[in-house]
Image: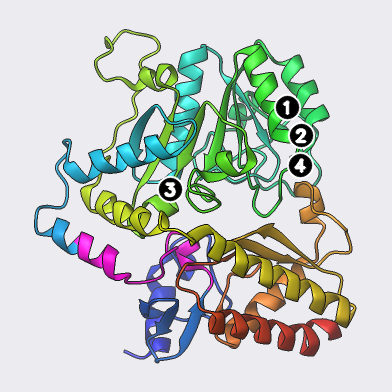
Amino acid sequence: MTQQQLLDRANRYFVGGGNGEFRLPSEVNFVVSHGKGSKIYDVDGKEYIDFLLGSGPMILGHCHPQVVEAVQQQILKGTTFMALNEPAIHLAEQVVESVPCGESIRLVVTGSEATMFALRAARAYTGKDKYLRFEGGWHGVNDSVLHGARTLQPGEYPRTAPDGGGIPKSWSQDVLASPFNDIDRARAVIEAYKDELAAIVVEPLQRCILPRPDFFAGLRELATKYGIVLIFDEIVTGFRMAWGGAQERYGTVPDLATFGKTISGGYPMAALCGRGDIMDVMNGWRPADDPKRVIASGTFNGYPIGAAAGLATLDVLRQPGTYERLFAMGDRITREISAMGRELSIPLLVGGEGPVLQVLFTADTEIRDYMSMYRADKRKAFTYGVEMIKRGCFVTPFEKIYLSLVHTDEDINRLLDASREVLRGVIAKM
């Protein structure tokens, strides 16, 4: 079939023509045929340098030989068992021993599950229902976290509202929000609700917003003081920003952390990990009538193929020079695109750091919270993304640029050349 025929069928059978929130305008929409290394190819044979990487999991690129071999070997042994298996045990050991908060772990399938179970564990452990999140952070698609994630105007802190249809409004009463990076406002909310708060949940790198030096230290101090469970959502940052994740890079140890993407090797796999006493509420040997007993189960928990792929991925990531290479590429992109903005008199910032970046068109000198990010020019960002895709750089409009270990200097050159062409030829005229 031709690409257009496949797109027509997708539009006929998929809701909205796709399988989720990710969508491309018709002028650049395509159907992926296959991927290899840092490239993907559409069914018509066009090559794209992949800077989306499946929304992050493909940190070793597509069809990495070690991952492929590990998966092939495991497939011959069986795909799933609903029982302990060797790859899952080894992956659990690797994560627990590598991250600062690690004591116990539960392997699940998706990041949304990991966050849901982490919050459930915190509520059971503390006996309290409310939690504090930070406006604009993304913690998956469960009903319990889609409050204050995509606010369309400044929040009436600490109140939240559902972020979409079908989410009970009543649940918002247990979800409080505060601006990221503002420890004074967070402190005010925490101290006002300290007797009702089970957890504080935060992305260490919120989308592309770097934490201020005092922010996590302040949250850690307040959580400890008031017996609140501090949860780091490291679905994006775990094993990507450093071997021990963002908690290692930013120097704050949470009570629980969630992981995904990089520990999956491109297969379904996620985890929640942390303090043994909190994690123990998920102990299946607890009596059924124990009010602290948490159900955190799933048919594919400990999925052996995902675990085998994750182990192979971590084996590559632990090699010397890994994070130096990822940050060198990111630093170069940040430096050169920022210089292009100054040269062309286009107000822009490159948010994030290292292997997670985002180009924001804004006159602000700093992106410190969700609302400063929200004020950025979305029309220009969308245009930039679409024009980059036209030039063979697969990025997602409005969102992050992910880097992998297999991106080459030539790949980065092409990204920068395309960026200069788009900024000078299109964005400067808007």
Using the image, tell me which numbered label, if any, was put on residue 260.
3
Q: For the residues marked 1 and 2, what is the alpha-carbon distance in whole angstroms?
A: 6 Å
Q: Are marks 3 and 4 in contact (CB under 8 Å)?
A: no
Q: Is residue 67 located in the magenta-colored stretch of the structure? A: yes
Q: Is residue 192 above or below residue 182?
A: above
Q: For the residues marked 3 and 2, what is the alpha-carbon distance in whole angstroms?
A: 26 Å
Q: Is residue 213 above or below residue 330?
A: above
Which SS class for mark 4? Answer: loop
Q: Viewed as shown, does residue 158 lie left or right of 277?
A: right
| Rendered location of residue 44, percent (x, y) | 40, 91
- Name the foreground residue: 331 vs 398: 331
| Rendered location of residue 227, percent (x, y) | 60, 13
> The magenta stretch spans which residues?
51-71
Q: Residues within 10 Å of mark 1 (few under 14, many from 20)?
A: some
Using the image, tell me which numbered label, if any, was put on residue 214.
2
Q: Residues within 10 Å of mark 4 (few under 14, many from 20)?
A: some
Q: Residues within 10 Å of mark 2 (few under 14, many from 20)?
A: few
| Rendered location of residue 153, percent (x, y) | 80, 47
| Rendered location of residue 297, percent (x, y) | 30, 32
What residue is shown at x 67% (from left), y 87% (from top)? 417
Q: For the residues marked 4 and 2, what is the alpha-carbon distance in whole angstroms?
A: 6 Å
Q: Which residue is mark 4?
A: 212
Q: Are marks 1 and 2 in contact (CB under 8 Å)?
A: yes
Which SS class for mark 3? Answer: loop
Q: Viewed as shown, does residue 227 lie left or right of 184?
A: left
Q: In terms of sequence position, does the residue under pointer 4 or pointer 1 come before the other?
A: 4
Q: Are marks 4 and 2 in contact (CB under 8 Å)?
A: yes
Q: For the residues marked 4 and 1, what is the alpha-carbon distance in whole angstroms?
A: 10 Å
Q: Which residue is mark 1?
A: 218
Residue extending farthest to the left is: 77
What residue is shown at x 11% (from left), y 52% (from top)? 78
Q: Is residue 266 located in the magenta-colored stretch of the structure? A: no
